[in-house]
């Protein structure tokens, strides 16, 4: 970081074309993941033969679980974002029953899987991923987007080993402060737990938690029994109560403490120099931010990919013939709730 004190790196942006898609444009290959509202499928375009991931959300379930705003936010946020370390949304559409989001297929799987397999990362490896996450967060914050769900499960690895942050279900536009309680318990900042108004600095707090988890294997306030009351009590008491592994690099410890500062007005990323303080921290001193932003630095781990469409990094799920139900004619009481998901149904 020598000679770039308190500055944020310049990043090159290549404009992404917006596409119009329909279900018949794709051949569904297999399920990559399942969730409360539907599935993510690996698909192949019949036109350019490229592989994509399509997130399919059941509209009735989204409405019943009061997730309309989060779902529309996810679409709007991803459409607004163009960054090397953030997943691309190529287009969206809907039919009578489902919403469809056409995104990058990121074949290396989750950083979470690699971390569990490795137990913990050596200091330089954790630093590489933390630096790429910091660049992505800084980009989002520059667009007044708060991410709110940083965790290893939401960081995917591309075939070149660089990251792609995914899952923008909790992201929203935030020019000043907001107050919704959402996120993953281990990664929540104390002001979120205290149901106080908070700003984008909660993402920098979560970066501190992520660095700790990458270096130690578990989040700093981990509760083996998954007791949220005890977990929230520890988070509220602050980082003074963290048990630090002896092997931690002292500079890493220093940065984690500055990011996990309980008082947001004293937290790194939220001071006068903003993200510049994070980039200029001594733990990152050997990082060439310009080259990293341009993906010119070789990643520490290259996923073992046998070729295009190799999804072996993802768990296998029962298919349950789910794709056969997509695109069927049905009554649609919820279509107006998702106005920016185009109707391009093959049966329309």
Image (spheres, helix red, strand yellow):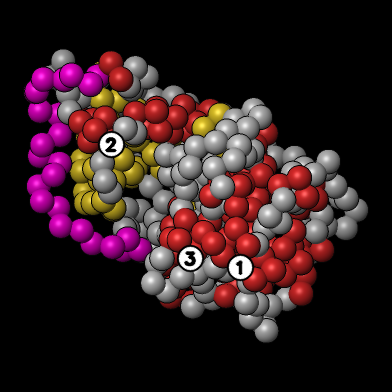
Q: Nearer the viewer, residue 260 or 321?
A: 260
Query: How many residues crowd around disc 1 within 10 Å: few (fewer than 14), some, or many (20 or more)?
Result: many
The N terminus appears in which quarter of the rendering?
bottom right
Give the CA separation, mark 2 to mark 3. Answer: 27 Å
| In this rendering, position of residue 59 left or right of residue 240 | left
* Residue that label 3 marks: 230
Q: Earlier in the sequence, mark 3 or mark 1?
A: 1
The C terminus appears in which quarter of the rendering?
top left
Q: Is residue 93 a member of the stretch shown in magenta?
A: no
- Residue at position x 66%, y 65% in the image: 239
Residue 263 visible from this viewpoint: yes
Give the prevailing secondary structure in the magenta stretch.
loop
Q: Can you give x and y, in whole percent of width and height, for residue 113 in the image? A: 41, 67
Q: In this view, does 102 lie above or below 337?
A: below
Query: How many residues crowd around disc 2 within 10 Å: few (fewer than 14), some, or many (20 or more)?
Result: few
* Residue that label 2 marks: 65
| Magenta part of the chain | 312-335
Give the CA separation, mark 3 to mark 1. Answer: 19 Å
Q: Which of marks 1 and 2 is in front?
A: 2
Q: Is residue 320 a member of the stretch shown in magenta?
A: yes
Q: Which of marks 2 and 3 is nearer the N terminus?
A: 2
Q: What element carries label 2?
A: loop
Image quarter for residue 108? bottom left
Q: Is residue 76 above or below residue 322?
A: above
């Amino acid at each position: 970081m020598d000679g770039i004190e308190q500055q944020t790196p310049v990043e090159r942006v290549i404009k992404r074309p917006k596409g119009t898609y329909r279900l018949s444009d794709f051949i569904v290959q297999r399920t990559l993941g399942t969730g409360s509202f539907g599935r993510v499928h690996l698909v192949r375009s019949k036109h350019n033969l490229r592989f994509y991931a399509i997130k399919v959300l059941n509209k009735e379930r989204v409405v019943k679980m009061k997730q309309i705003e989060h779902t529309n936010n996810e679409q709007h946020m991803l459409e607004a974002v163009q960054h090397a370390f953030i997943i691309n949304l190529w287009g969206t559409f809907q039919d009578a029953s489902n919403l469809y989001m056409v995104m990058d297929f990121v074949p290396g799987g989750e950083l979470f899987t690699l971390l569990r397999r490795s137990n913990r990362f050596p200091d330089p490896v954790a630093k590489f991923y933390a630096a790429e996450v910091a660049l992505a967060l800084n980009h989002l914050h520059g667009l007044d987007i708060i991410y709110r769900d940083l965790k290893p499960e939401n960081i995917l690895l591309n075939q070149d080993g660089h990251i792609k942050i995914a899952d923008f279900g909790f992201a929203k536009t935030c020019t000043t402060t907001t107050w919704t309680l959402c996120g993953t318990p281990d990664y929540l900042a104390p002001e979120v737990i205290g149901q106080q108004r908070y700003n984008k600095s909660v993402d920098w707090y979560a970066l501190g938690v992520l660095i700790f988890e990458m270096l130690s294997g578990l989040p700093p306030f981990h509760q083996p029994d998954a007791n949220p009351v005890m977990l929230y009590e520890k988070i509220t008491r602050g980082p003074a109560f963290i048990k630090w592994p002896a092997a931690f690099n002292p500079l890493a410890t220093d940065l984690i403490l500055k990011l996990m500062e309980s008082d947001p007005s004293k937290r790194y990323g939220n001071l006068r120099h903003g993200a510049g303080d994070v980039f200029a921290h001594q733990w990152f001193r050997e990082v060439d931010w310009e080259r990293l932003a341009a993906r010119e630095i070789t990643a520490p781990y290259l996923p073992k990919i046998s070729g295009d469409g190799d999804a072996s990094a993802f768990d296998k799920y029962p298919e349950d013939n789910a794709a056969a139900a997509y695109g069927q004619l049905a009554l649609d009481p919820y279509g107006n709730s998702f106005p920016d998901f185009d109707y391009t149904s093959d049966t329309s």
